[in-house]
Image (spheres, rainbow, N blue to C red):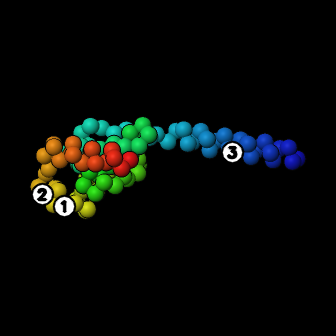
Amino acid sequence: MKRKADQNLRNSDEEAAKDEGKRKRRKYDSEYVSFGFIAVGTGEDLPLCVVCLQTISNDAMKPAKLKRHLNTMHSDFVSRPKPKEYFERQKELAKNIF
Ligand SMILES: [Zn+2]
């Protein structure tokens, strides 16, 4: 009886591991720079806001969420888009932090 319980426990652990693998990590797209985000982290899969230099979760790696961050946190950025040089400079800054 005990042995069966152990078996069940192991199976459920394996199920959990499988679920973990299925959960896909979102990929950074170079277009996201137009929303003010660059990629940092292992595998460059964390979006970093170049305005506040804060990373947000990989789960938020999609245009709608990135835009929402910009619109709510940095509305001035939206009305006055920054030149490419701004991103480059912020990226260098970010590299020193991360
Ligand atoms: Zn920000």
Kindly identify which residue carries mark 1: 75
The answer for how far apart the CA atoms under marks 2 and 3 are is: 51 Å
Residue 34: x percent and y percent? 20, 45
Give the quarter of the image for residue 75.
bottom left
Tell me the SS state at disc 1. Answer: helix
Tell me the SS state at disc 2. Answer: helix
The answer for how far apart the CA atoms under marks 2 and 1 are is: 7 Å
- Asked if residue 79 lies left or right of residue 36, the reply is left
Do labels 2 and 1 touch, CB within 8 Å? yes
Kindly identify which residue carries mark 2: 79
- Nearer to us in this view, 65 or 48: 48
Type of amino acid at the residue the image marks with label 1: Ser
Q: Is mark 2 within 8 Å of ligand 1?
A: no
Q: From the viewer's perspective, is residue 84 above or below residue 76? A: above
Do labels 3 and 1 touch, CB within 8 Å? no
Residue 89: x percent and y percent? 21, 46
Q: Is residue 41 visible?
A: yes
Give the quarter of the image for residue 28.
top left
Residue 18: x percent and y percent? 59, 39
Instruction: Look at 27% across and 44% down and name the residue there.
Output: 92
Q: Nearer the viewer, mark 3 or mark 1?
A: 1
- Nearer to us in this view, 42 or 27: 42
- Asked if residue 39 lies left or right of residue 87, the reply is right
Instruction: Look at 16% across and 43% down and name the residue there.
Output: 85
Kindly identify which residue carries mark 3: 12
Instruction: Look at 21% across and 42% down and name the residue there.
Output: 88
